[in-house]
């Protein structure tokens, strides 16, 4: 600072040059953030038809399942359940896979045409951003195949992290498992204590148990949540990102920082 | 301030102005706009909800839901055997009532779905000028595509199957031929070896006889002497017989060795033939399999473009029909009307069925409580009550979130944010507006009414 005060002219020029040659990622153009209303896409004819067909299939499968488990042992029932579940999942993939692929191609195409580096789900946008929902719907309603763009999305200052991968980290997994076990034990105790009690007593007991659950959550889960959040924030800063969202809210583009966060957590 | 300082200040200002070449901020070169112009903000909605005046009400509703959910899983304890039996009987009847109700609802839903599909099909056909009895224009197109694709696949399968059968027949003929050749080869080799052994045996036999010939002739000459005593005659005869027996034994031993050798040789030849046959069979089978895979690939390669073209044609027809329907306001209105009619018909029937079902459950609980002299509870009814409170809570939560979102938008507009996101996992250079929104909301609470839960149960 002393040096800065002594030579303000030089400092200003250096600062000007520095700021002018800042990496492009810092100079994020906020107009490259788009969003799409995925629930609106889900209301389109082909999706509704697929949903109806799947619901019909599920109903028929449920009837078959009920017939199949009659007189079977619990182990056999479990096995039958898995088989039926697998069939349902396969049917779901068959019905929705091509539709989702087409929707994804349309979103990518619109995003590329509009020069967007990231498209997120509408639910996380409170203000601003470019709504491309109607463009995507128009493209989906066009006849013929939807071709995805040839070029990949440009680098984005919006990062995303896949929580399912973070949940597989030993520390996170252990904390989740411990808390789940605690909650199950507590639920069993609560059920036993509620028996034969008046409504007021029940309310009191439930409140007490909720407090215990909160305390355990703070003790077991909160440190993991805090360290994960700190790791994400640190990665965001290191990579000069604006912010990091959950992968489930990212629809297209963005910068995947999951591996960096996993590394930071280790 | 000296001249140098003034120049310095100006340069710093220019530097900041230049810096905007990397940031497309909306505020202009010298920061004439708002402080956050063009930047990205984020808000922690949960944190704002937590300080909202109605948060306590949300929490109370959550506690009520938890309590009801817990209660809905409770079962009566300390019952007599008779009471337990009565309770079980009640559960069975409640369960049967639930099954009947679900089946009834499902049947009503299916009925209305089918009725709607039929009405829409007829409406489409009328709109598109097709025969209303053809089972729907879109369905007809789909059926047509399906049958054409199926015919194409069947033809390809048939061609492939014929090729497979021809290959298998060719292989069978070839292997039969190989088998015959190998058998002939074995037979030839065995005959040659048998002949060689036979020649050796004859030569050996001659040699053995020749070796004893002189002694045998002497003995035979002696036996022709009439003056020979009976004892001497008997001795010579015995000696002659022994010589002949020895000769025969030697010849028999050789024949036995030769037979064993021949048997061993036969076994060896058969094993070799079997190995050769197996190798040939495998090679033939592998070659056939490779040919089949190649042909299958060829068929697929040939069929794929045809299927794609067929699919494209189908999609095009479908899109044309869909577009015609989409661009026809009269059809859209009629289709919506059909849907609304069916929907309201179903909702009315489902509502009546639900009321009747709830009454049935209540009556069953009352009846069995009276029989057992214990007040039983209907866990499903409690669970439904929990769902109702949960829906009310969702409704209130949504209203609170909407109010917060409106506040965020005000803050964003005022401060010139370009985008404000929520559900953010971590922040880099984006600006956190949570506190600002919370403060704005607090100020708002003092002047305007807070949202109220509608109590409608939501959706």
Image (cartoon, rainbow, N blue to C red):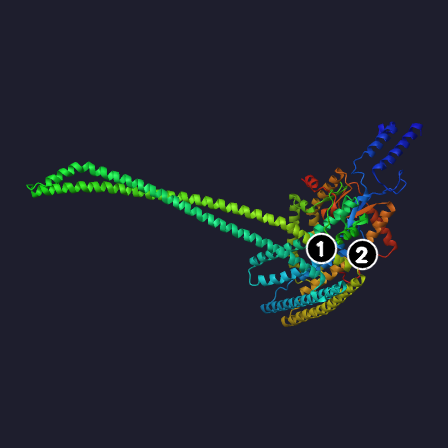
Q: Is residue B41 left or right of residue A263?
A: right
Q: Residue at x 74, y 39 (%)?
A: A234
Q: Are there few (<14), some (14-19), or many (20+) residues within 10 Å of tag 2?
A: some
Residue B44 makes an appearance in the image: no
Image mark 2: chain = B
The disc at residue B315 is 1
Q: Look at mark 2 in the image and give the residue it sits on.
A: B399
| Residue located 84% across and 43% down the image | B38
Please state which of residues A180 and B315 is positioned toward the viewer in this rendering. Answer: B315
Q: Residue A139: x and y, percent?
A: 76, 51
At 14% from the left and 42% from the top, the residue drawn is B238
Q: Quadrant of residue B198?
A: top left
- The numbered mark at residue B446 is none
Give whichever of A19, A92 is nearer the camera. A92
Q: Quadrant of residue A46?
A: bottom right
From the viewer's perspective, tell me whether residue B268 is left or right of residue B357: left
């Amino acid at each position: 600072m002393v040096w800065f005060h002594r030579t303000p002219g030089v400092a200003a020029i250096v600062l000007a040059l520095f700021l002018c040659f800042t990496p492009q990622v810092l100079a994020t153009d906020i107009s490259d953030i788009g969003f799409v209303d995925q629930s609106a896409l889900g209301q389109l004819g082909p999706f509704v038809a697929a949903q109806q067909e799947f619901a019909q299939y599920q109903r028929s499968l449920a009837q078959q399942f009920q017939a199949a488990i009659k007189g079977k042992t619990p182990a056999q029932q479990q096995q039958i359940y898995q088989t039926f579940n697998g069939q349902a999942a396969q049917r779901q993939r068959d019905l929705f896979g091509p539709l989702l692929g087409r929707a994804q191609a349309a979103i990518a195409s619109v995003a590329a045409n509009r020069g967007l580096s990231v498209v997120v789900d509408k639910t996380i946008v409170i203000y601003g951003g470019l709504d491309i929902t109607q463009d995507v719907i128009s493209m989906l309603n066009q006849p013929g195949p939807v071709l995805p763009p040839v070029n990949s999305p440009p680098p984005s200052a919006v990062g995303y992290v896949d929580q399912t991968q973070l949940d597989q980290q030993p520390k996170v997994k252990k904390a989740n498992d411990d808390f789940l076990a605690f909650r199950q034990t507590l639920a069993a105790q609560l059920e036993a204590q509620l028996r034969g009690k008046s409504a007021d007593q029940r309310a009191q007991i439930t409140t007490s148990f909720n407090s215990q659950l909160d305390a355990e959550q703070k003790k077991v889960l909160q440190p993991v949540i805090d360290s994960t959040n700190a790791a994400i924030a640190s990665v965001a800063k290191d990579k000069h990102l604006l912010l990091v969202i959950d992968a489930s809210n990212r629809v297209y583009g963005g910068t995947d920082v999951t591996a960096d966060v996993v590394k930071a957590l280790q | 301030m000296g001249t140098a300082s003034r120049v310095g200040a100006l340069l710093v200002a220019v530097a900041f102005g230049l810096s905007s070449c990397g940031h497309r901020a909306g505020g202009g070169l010298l920061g004439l706009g708002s402080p956050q112009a063009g930047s990205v903000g984020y808000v922690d909605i949960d944190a704002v909800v937590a300080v909202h005046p109605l948060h306590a009400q949300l929490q109370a509703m959550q506690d009520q839901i938890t309590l009801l959910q817990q209660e809905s899983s409770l079962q009566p304890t300390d019952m007599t055997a008779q009471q337990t039996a009565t309770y079980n009987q009640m559960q069975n009847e409640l369960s049967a009532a639930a099954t009947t109700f679900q089946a009834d609802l499902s049947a009503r839903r299916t009925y209305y779905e089918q009725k709607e599909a039929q009405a829409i099909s007829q409406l489409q056909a009328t709109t598109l000028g097709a025969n209303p009895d053809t089972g729907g224009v879109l369905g007809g197109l789909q059926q047509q595509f399906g049958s054409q694709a199926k015919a194409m696949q069947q033809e390809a399968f048939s061609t492939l199957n014929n090729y497979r059968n021809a290959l298998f027949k060719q292989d069978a003929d070839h292997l039969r031929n190989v088998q015959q050749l190998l058998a002939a080869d074995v037979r030839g080799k065995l005959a040659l070896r048998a002949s060689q052994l036979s020649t050796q045996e004859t030569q050996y036999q001659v040699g053995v006889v020749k070796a004893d010939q002189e002694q045998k002739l002497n003995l035979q000459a002696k036996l022709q002497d009439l003056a020979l005593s009976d004892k001497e005659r008997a001795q010579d005869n015995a000696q002659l017989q022994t010589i002949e027996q020895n000769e025969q034994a030697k010849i028999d031993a050789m024949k036995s060795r030769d037979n064993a050798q021949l048997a061993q040789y036969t076994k060896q030849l058969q094993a070799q033939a079997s190995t050769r046959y197996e190798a040939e069979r495998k090679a033939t089978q592998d070659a056939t399999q490779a040919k089949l895979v190649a042909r299958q690939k060829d068929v697929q390669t040939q069929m794929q473009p045809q299927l794609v073209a067929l699919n494209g044609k189908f999609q095009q027809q479908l899109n044309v029909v869909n577009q015609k329907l989409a661009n026809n306001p009269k059809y859209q209105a009629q289709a919506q009307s059909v849907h609304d009619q069916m929907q309201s018909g179903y909702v009315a029937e489902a509502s009546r069925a639900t009321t009747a079902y709830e009454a049935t459950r209540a009556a069953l609980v009352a009846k069995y409580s009276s029989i057992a002299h214990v007040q039983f509870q209907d866990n499903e009814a409690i669970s439904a009550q929990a769902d109702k409170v949960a829906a009310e809570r969702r409704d209130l939560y949504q209203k609170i979130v909407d109010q917060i979102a409106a506040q965020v938008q005000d803050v964003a507009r005022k401060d010139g944010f370009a985008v404000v996101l929520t559900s953010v996992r971590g922040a880099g250079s984006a600006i956190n507006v949570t506190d600002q929104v919370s403060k704005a909301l607090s100020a708002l609470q003092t002047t305007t009414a807070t949202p109220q839960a509608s109590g409608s149960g939501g959706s």
